[in-house]
Image (spheres, rainbow, N blue to C red):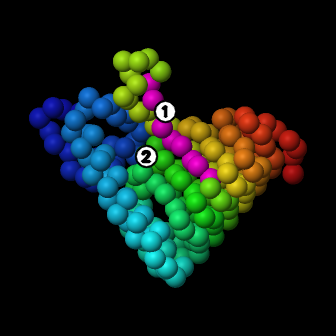
């Protein structure tokens, strides 16, 4: 990014959605990141602190993501996210209570997928070198169609879970999951094909 150019919020969101890393040394980007996070917090507080109909929840998620969320979407709050603008939700998707998404790197959820209670999806890693710890590197998480994610699963950055697969409760998914597979454990391993 050029030093003499100040990004607008829409441009920053596009920059993040394109998968760029951000360092704590990049003050302008950090300022925009915090602004985006505070906006997400405001929307999430609205979602989590009073009762809403399913239609109202769809509207809140449309506001959070900046995209129209299909009317078939169902979420049981509370729900948490630190960015909000890089969540992509298909049709007939269900989020159970307590999900926490770190979405700046991109979370893509296919049609007819169900996310269990207290699922955490992370899309950012920090640099390994101590001088690079303040830099976050995004990697999207992609969840296919008809996927079932069990309760208390953690999905790490860069993972793709292909169509029709199941992730057992409590698993930590560190690698891609092929279609029509059951994975479970820490780290998650292949259990069987379905």
Which residue does the numbered mark 1 point to in the structure image? 125
**First in residue order: circle 2 vs circle 1:** 2
- 139 in magenta: no
Q: Is any atom of residue 154 visible in this view?
A: yes
| Front in this rendered view, residue 184 or 90 | 184
Q: What count of labels does the image hold?
A: 2
Residue 97 sits in quarter? bottom right
Left or right of residue 75, residue 166 in this image: right
Give me the residue at 43% from left, 46% from top: 104
Q: Are marks 2 and 1 in contact (CB under 8 Å)?
A: no
Give me the residue at 15% from left, 32% from top: 3
Report crowding for label 2: few under 14, some 14 to 19, many 20 or more residues within 10 A (C-alpha): many
Residue 92 sits in quarter? bottom right
Q: Is residue 48 above or below residue 178?
A: below
Left or right of residue 185, residue 139 in this image: left
Horizontal and vertical percent for residue 36?
Answer: 31, 53
Which residue does the numbered mark 2 point to in the structure image? 104
Could you tell me which secondary element the residue under label 2 belongs to?
A: loop
Q: Is any atom of residue 68 visible in this view?
A: no
Disc 2 and disc 1: Cα gap in Å?
A: 11 Å
Horizontal and vertical percent for residue 179?
Answer: 76, 47
Which image quarter holds the N terminus?
top left
Part of the protein shown in magenta: 119-127
Give me the residue at 40% from left, 66% from top: 45
Report crowding for label 1: few under 14, some 14 to 19, many 20 or more residues within 10 A (C-alpha): some
């Amino acid at each position: 990014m050029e030093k003499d150019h100040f990004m607008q919020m829409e441009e920053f969101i596009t920059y993040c959605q394109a998968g760029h890393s951000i360092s704590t040394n990049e003050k302008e980007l950090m300022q925009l990141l915090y602004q985006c996070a505070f906006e997400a917090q405001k929307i999430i507080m609205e979602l989590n602190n009073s009762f809403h109909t399913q239609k109202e929840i769809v509207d809140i998620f449309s506001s959070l993501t900046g995209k129209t969320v299909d009317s078939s979407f169902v979420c049981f709050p509370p729900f948490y996210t630190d960015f909000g603008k890089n969540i992509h939700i298909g049709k007939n998707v269900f989020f159970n209570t307590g999900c926490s998404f770190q979405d700046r790197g991109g979370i893509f959820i296919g049609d007819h997928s169900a996310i269990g209670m207290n699922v955490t999806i992370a899309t950012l890693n920090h640099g390994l070198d101590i001088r690079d710890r303040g830099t976050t590197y995004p990697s999207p998480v992609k969840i296919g169609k008809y996927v079932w994610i069990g309760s208390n699963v953690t999905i790490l950055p860069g993972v793709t879970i292909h169509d029709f697969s199941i992730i057992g409760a409590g698993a930590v998914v560190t690698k891609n999951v092929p279609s029509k597979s059951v994975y479970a454990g820490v780290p998650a391993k292949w259990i069987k094909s379905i």
